[in-house]
Amino acid sequence: MTGVKALVLTGYGLNCDYETDYALKLAGADSHRVHINELIQGEQTQTGPKLSQYHILVFGGGFSWADDHGAGVVLASKLKYNIGEQIERFIRDGKLIMGICNGFQSIVNLGLLPGFDQSYQERRIALAANDTGNFIDTWVRLKINNDSPCVFTKGLSHIELPVRHAEGKFTASHQDMDRLFENNQVVMQYAGDNGTPAQGHWPVNPNGSLRDVAGICDPTGRVFGLMPHPEAFNHVTNHPDWTFQKETLKREGKTLDTQEGDGIRIFRNAVEYIQEHFEQDLPKPRV
Amino acid sequence: MVSRLETRLKPDLMDAEGTKIRQKAADYFNLRIRDIRVIRVLTIDANLDEHQLYRLQHDIFTNPVTDLSSFSPLANDFDWLIWVGFRPGVRDTAGSTAVEAIEDLLKIRFKEGESVYTSKLYEIQGDLSEQQAALIANEILANDIIQQWRVIPKKDWDTGQGIGLIVPKVILDHTPRMNTIAISSDKELKSISEERSLALQEMDIPTIRHYFLREDILAERKKYGLQLPTDVELEYISQARSDHCNHNTFRGLFRYHDRSTGQKETVDNLFKTCIESPTLQIKEHKDWVISVLWDNAGVARFDENHYYCITGETHNSPSNMEAYGGAITGIVGIYRDPMGTGKGSRLILGMYGYCVGQRDYHGELKPRLHPRRLLDGVIEGVKDGGNKSGIPTPYGLVLFDDGYMGKCLVFVTSMGIMPAMVNNESSHKKVTKPGDLIIMSGGRVGKDGIHGVTAASETYTEHTPAGHVQIGDPYTQKKMHDFLLEARDQGLIAYITDNGGGGLSSSIGESARFSNGCRVDLDKVPLKYEGLDQWEIWVSESQERMTIGIKPEHLDRFMALSAKHAVESTVIGEYTDSGYLRLDYKGKTCALIKMDFMESDFPKWEFDAEWAPPEMRGLREPVISEPEKHGTVLKNILSRSNIGSKNWISRQYDHEVQGGSVIKPLIGRHRDIPSDAIVVRPILDSQKGIASAQALNPFYSTIDTYHMTAVTIDEAVRKVLAVGGDPDHIGGVDNFCWPTIQYDPDKNPDGKYKAAQLVRSNWALRDYCLAFGIPLLSGKDSMYIDGNLEGPFGEKRKVSGLPTLLFTVSSVIQDITRCVTMDAKFPGDLIYVLGDTKNELGGGEYYQMMGELGLHVPEVKVEDVWPIYRALHQAIQQGLISSAHAIARGGLGVHLAFTAMGGALGMDVHVKDVPCSKPLSDTRILYSESAGRFIVTIDPARKQAFEKLFKGMPAGCIGTISDSKRFRIQSKTGSWMMKEDIDELKECWKRPFGGLI
């Protein structure tokens, strides 16, 4: 255990908390599933968990408040008007926030992204209904921007992950889109087998996202939101081609050498970042 | 004060919902619409000031990036405007979440009666007649059972008032009342029962009267001010004695007569003889079977520290009326069963099965919902129910037959996982003890699912609840699920069960049997709206509720947890050892029934069952010569509705959530071929997995339901073994759906035959479960899959569904990395067929394509196939297999194509090498649907080791995988009977539903 503490939100219809918690643990974090009400109560009454005790805050996937009134909208409003200040302080303290799927939808509604000009309160991005008008579960290939300041994707050039959503169409004004690209805040884009962006083609771009954007970060690279689910690629057997890969290896006289899925690398980057930057806070390893 | 907030997408943004409706209007009715745009309406019936309204408008409900909103009407650019809103009393989840959001934002509480209602406006641009606009409203946008709608032409639009302020609030204006019922004669009770829609069974009436006239009972009742039975009591008895709750058909007496042999046999209780007894026998030898035949789901061992539970049921009638509502209620409902099994389990997956009329049906009968609309609604219901519950839906089957237009079938299956021990006790155990508190958690009670809700006694008004069809609410249930797991882990749950059919009457009635009594205060049950009679509270089937028994000393902790999870929980009574079930309302007793009354000697249901074997019924093999165009035959079969790709359904269902997906529903190089079975890893840090698959073969029923059942069981078993399932751990779930079997010379003239079909099916279930060693972990029966459909002349025609059995198999995988998929892996790999191919095309797809039924239905000889299954398992464990696939409907030709398409590789196959115990023609070999067979591909380097395992068994190397993309089959005479491009085959296979997303 690294002493890096992570908090995964639960409750009100969120649902990827077990596997997100598991992925963080695999990456070395001391992770806890904490109910939204428990956190609010903790902050407001001095009893219970507090954000300041953690280094990584994860808004995971799910259907908070059933996705009624726009995905992530009610969760964002609930947090903003109860513990908005504490969340902002968490960012300014140099800690990490990650929003996956419903969590991404929530943090854009909270205004934590895009975080232009150090502002973490503005709703400037929407994850609108998929162009098909329907939910889709499919694996996508993502091209990762190596020039992005995003701490979660360090050392990754591409990754395959599943998407599972009905509202994932990344939408922003033309000016904001340009600005995101200029700032290298676009972290990942939906891409074809050869690694080039999907150019909007379905289902390579599964939702019609503008300029194939799948995930962005704030200018510091410490707040990261993405539609795909890295926690769902926690084991090699999650990958749709794993039986083919196993067979390929076998014929080369090899076996599946690692059991860990690629998605864990994103969480491990987060844990390592905290180890590096919060060294003084972390318990010293016993020799 | 009522306000109406309207929200719409900015005009430059694409309206995906509108586009989808426009497509449907074109596909369904050939209507050309230029544009449809949606306006979301929130009608806020609460006392809020302008500032508060401004805040909720901007801080919650308007996304500044995408939305425009206003408290004045937004609609302006349309030819027709359609408004669609719920009827009073229909579950409006979005309305409730809006209330939650507003309360939290403004730090206020809505007062009793205040609420928010959601509805939608559709702006339609297009040259439509009023009739056509109404068609869109009624056939695409709204179902009048749960929704109300208005069609407004441009000229009638009031730009100031808009749609007005429509508040679908339930106002019953009724003082709850308990009635007593006269029982001076059987005849009198029968007529009152009919009058009040009590639905008491006629043959039960003497037993019921006898009970209420007993002196000891009268004396006991007198103490509580009761004499004649009350409506609460009779409703309770009626519920408990219904076929749904009591399985009277399966527990009935069948007089079976085989007309060909003259054999006569009395079968007393199909459940006991064909389900319970074999399962108990098998349980003796299988220590992984933990708990069967009594709880909400069966329980089996997953590993040292965990059990899994499984169950399945149907939700046919409600889905037939309101497809979306019925299906979502069905899937959300089946999720409560594992939640209420033992001390409660965490849900890990759901599965579905839909049997409907042909999607493009254009015959002359008029079902309430066209199969296309019905299927669309059912798919969407399970999508929302599963996805919003955070439970993967990785497997399902769809079958088209116009017989299901009388009543569609919607099967739902679920699995859960729980720690093996809770509080130092095996988690499958639960009891109620005197003094334990009865708690109802989750949703509130309304007039949902109560018979005859809008019956004659009530006048229908705009505020009458539309309660007979419900809409499940996965959001409320997910909160409850999370809460109950935490309560379980803290050791706070003594007993838990769900509220499904029969509502509290069933959940409390059954749980009180452990303590031997209970007392319930019906007035404490939280209601959705005032004005429910006592009996209605007791039998209401309002969803998303669990009944929990807890120790009084745990109450505070339990309630605190419930509050944390924002779940409503209420103490509504206590368990006692009084020997009586007692219900009070505001201090006055309204029901007192002796606990052992339900075990009284009620008369059995009796059926005449008359069997004539297929030959005697005139069935015969068709006379068809060898076709000349073999390639075209295959392509045609691939594009038939029951073979064709249904990928558009699986892709809408989240099958990755929970992070444990191992074998997915769609696999292969292009991830688009259905897998035989799915595998999940429910405990993320374990290498173990659960495999599951289902089978459904009702077309064979028309020849012989005995073999239909055998083949269905065998197919589900093979599918699970094909991915690496363990032959020593095969759990089964039987879901029967049968047409009415009670003979009636006018209404059901073939009832005796249908009864015999049911008996034979059960015999096969018994025989094959014993032979394969399958304990039936769970099962349900759903009878009466008939309907009377309107014909073109104003007549009604009875349509009965095929006798249908959905069989589900579960298995535990010791090491998931040994699993295999069905797609061919590499060019040069050898292709094997395991198992004997026989002349068994009867009831199959090939004959059906030729308009024939045939006679020779596939049969299963367990002694022949079992060694093959074991050898296959060994081969998979030893890593000898590259792909394995169970041959099912369509036969070898179709399934070879699947293996090839899955690998995006060609193959060369020689028909002469297919193992056949008797010589068969090329076509018969390719399209026979013989059971017990697999297609396997292997690395040629493993040939020797592989063949050694199958020595002496029918296992033939029939060809090789090629990299040519050519699917080539060589006839027995050596000519190439087909050389098809696999991409073209795939295109044919995807054709029937190709445009659907």
Image: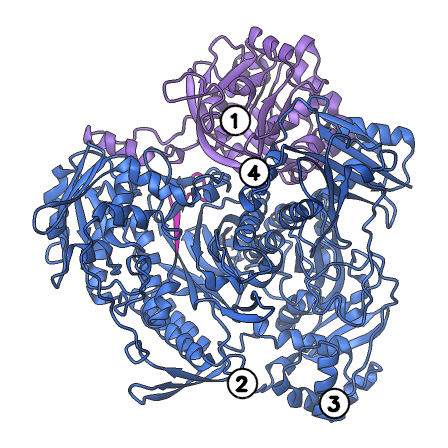
Looking at the image, residue B520 lies above or below residue A185: below
* View extreme (left): residue: B973
Q: Where is residue B589 in the image (x, y as percent from the top left)?
A: 82, 75
Q: Position of residue B943 (x, y in %)?
A: 12, 43
First in sequence: mark 3 or mark 4? 4
First in sequence: mark 4 or mark 2? 4
Q: In the rendered structure, the residue with mark 1 lies on which chain? A: A
Q: How far apart are marks 1 and 2 (CA)?
A: 62 Å
Residue A99 visible to an observer of this rendering = no
What residue does disc 4 label? Answer: B23
Q: Nearer the viewer, residue A259 or A128?
A: A128
Q: In the rendered structure, the residue with mark 4 lies on which chain? A: B
Q: Give residue B231's quadrant in the image.
A: bottom right
Shown in purple, the chain is A
- Nearer to us of marks 3 and 1 is 3
What residue does disc 1 label? Answer: A29
Residue visible at 75% across and 59% down in the picture? B446
Q: In the rendered structure, the residue with mark 3 lies on which chain? A: B
Amino acid type at image mark 1: Ala
Q: Distance between the residues labelled 3 and 4?
A: 57 Å
Q: In the rendered structure, the residue with mark 2 lies on which chain? A: B
